Amino acid sequence: MKALTWQGKRDVRVETAPDPKIEQPSDAIVRVTSTNICGSDLHLYEVLGAFLETGDILGHEAMGIVEEVGPQASEHLQPGDRVVVPFNISCGHCWMCQRQLYAQCETTQVREHGKGAALFGYTKLYGSVPGGQAEYLRVPQAHFGPIKVPQGPPDDRFVYLSDILPTAWQAVVYADIPKGGSVAVYGLGPVGQLCTRIAHHLGAGRVFGVDLVPERLATARQYGAEVIDAGHTTDVPGYLHDTTDGRGPDAVIDAVGMESHGNPIAKIGQQMVTMLPDAVAEPLAKNFGIDRMGALMDCIKTVRRGGTVSVSGVYGGSIDPMPMMEMFDKGIQLRMGQCHVKRWINDIMPLVLDDADPLGTESLATHHLPLDQAPHGYDIFQKKQDGCQKVVLRP
Ligand SMILES: NC(=O)c1ccc[n+]([C@@H]2O[C@H](COP(=O)([O-])OP(=O)(O)OC[C@H]3O[C@@H](n4cnc5c(N)ncnc54)[C@H](O)[C@@H]3O)[C@@H](O)[C@H]2O)c1
Ligand SMILES: [Zn+2]
Ligand SMILES: [Zn+2]
């Protein structure tokens, strides 16, 4: 089959890989019909190469048609079913899964690296599981994971259930916005866009969106956010305080993550780590800060006293300095983590099935490309060229 493979920093290629086969009785094989490029893939493309091997198949946002089912998954799935595959691999019955903490599944936890549930296409830290930017995907724990969706509506209605829709939903729930209260969303990539829409849907009164990319600001404005251009506003937290009676929004969501703009010195450090040989870069990346934390720092500054910061952006360092005095003195809540995808699907499904498409999933992708053009997709998504806001690949 054809698959998108990681070859090095900013170097991904479509290559021929062996067709996946059923390896465990609870596996299924899915023929992929749509598979997205995510901001999380950009971290692999740019800074997390120390944790990848040449030839690793990337991708964790896939949907398609079930081709083959192992004996232990055959009660849940049949060949021909149309399914979306959650990015985390969870068993559905362990102690963590019983509490719906699917991103921490104890059956698939990658204990060797001290990590939570295995993920598709996301480095050896998360199990080196071949990803879904490919023609076929082997899905472990298929008795539980795959989300069945009806035939009929286009893939774009459903494909974001694999990650960014439940991620945004969880970010908004974790943000704990009071009814009619205010929330600021830092980062208006696909995750941040969906956060602004879901925040409105769940009853926020004022929704602010912060980014530096004009077309991303425009999209958020179209969906009712009050937008702030961080490229042309010297003090975004100060501005947000001024517009909320001097207090700051009730909640703030970080939908930026480890590659925040505006940290020139941290950027140099991060770039240096990515240029070192893996043996040196890996312990550095693991044990020290590899994060550019400008957006998270702004989130902490922005939130009102006693408010909540909800972090959905991915961070990876382990001694990143945090403004403890400010956090303690302001008495903020901080919630974060990988999304527990299946936990939120019942809440979201009626919205993606609604003819009116209230979350605008059908128009979220700016680019639909054949798998062969995936390297071009990575390039324009990272550089924010050609108006690129989300890429869906069609293998
Ligand atoms: N927690 C999870 O389970 C989960 C799931 C999916 C994605 N993520 C993470 O969420 C983050 C966003 O993902 P995405 O797909 O939307 O990515 P993206 O890269 O398209 O979006 C990030 C946006 O942040 C903006 N930005 C950069 N610095 C900023 C700053 N200082 N202030 C304001 N905006 C700034 C960029 O211009 C960009 O539009 C990534 O870190 C990704 O890894 C987490
Ligand atoms: Zn993703
Ligand atoms: Zn489990």
Image (spheres, helix red, strand yellow):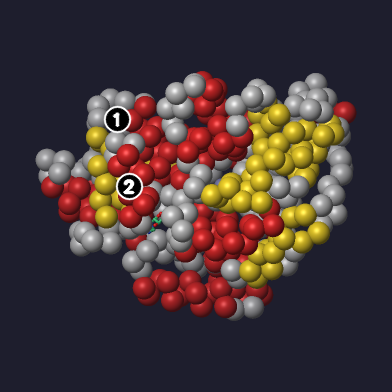
Say few, some or many: other residues with alpha carbon within 10 Å of mark 2 (under 14 / 14 to 19 / 20 or more): few
Rendered image quadrant of residue 33:
top right
For the point 81% across and 59% down, the residue is 16
> Which numbered tag is attached to residue 204?
1
Is residue 99 visible in the rendered structure shown here? no
Which numbered mark, 2 or 1, is in the foreground of this view?
2
Whole-percent x, y for residue 79 in the image: 82, 28
Q: Tell me the number on the disc at residue 327.
A: none
Tell me which label, 2 or 1, sits earlier in the chain: 1
Looking at the picture, does residue 139 appear above or below residue 228? above
Image location (x, y in percent) of residue 165: 50, 36
Q: Which residue is mark 2?
A: 218
Q: What residue is drawn where x is 57% and y is 57%?
A: 377
Q: Amino acid at mark 2?
A: Ala
Contact flag, marks 2 and 1 (Cβ < 8 Å): no
Q: Secondary structure at mark 2?
A: helix
Determine whether 96 is above or below 314 in the image. Answer: above
When asked about the image quadrant of residue 235, the answer is bottom left
Q: Position of residue 312 (x, y in %)?
A: 45, 46
Q: Nearer the viewer, residue 237 or 377?
A: 377
Q: Nearer the viewer, residue 206 or 35?
A: 35
Q: Is residue 311 left or right of residue 341?
A: left
> SS for tag 1?
loop
What count of labels does the image hold? 2
CA distance for labels 2 and 1: 20 Å
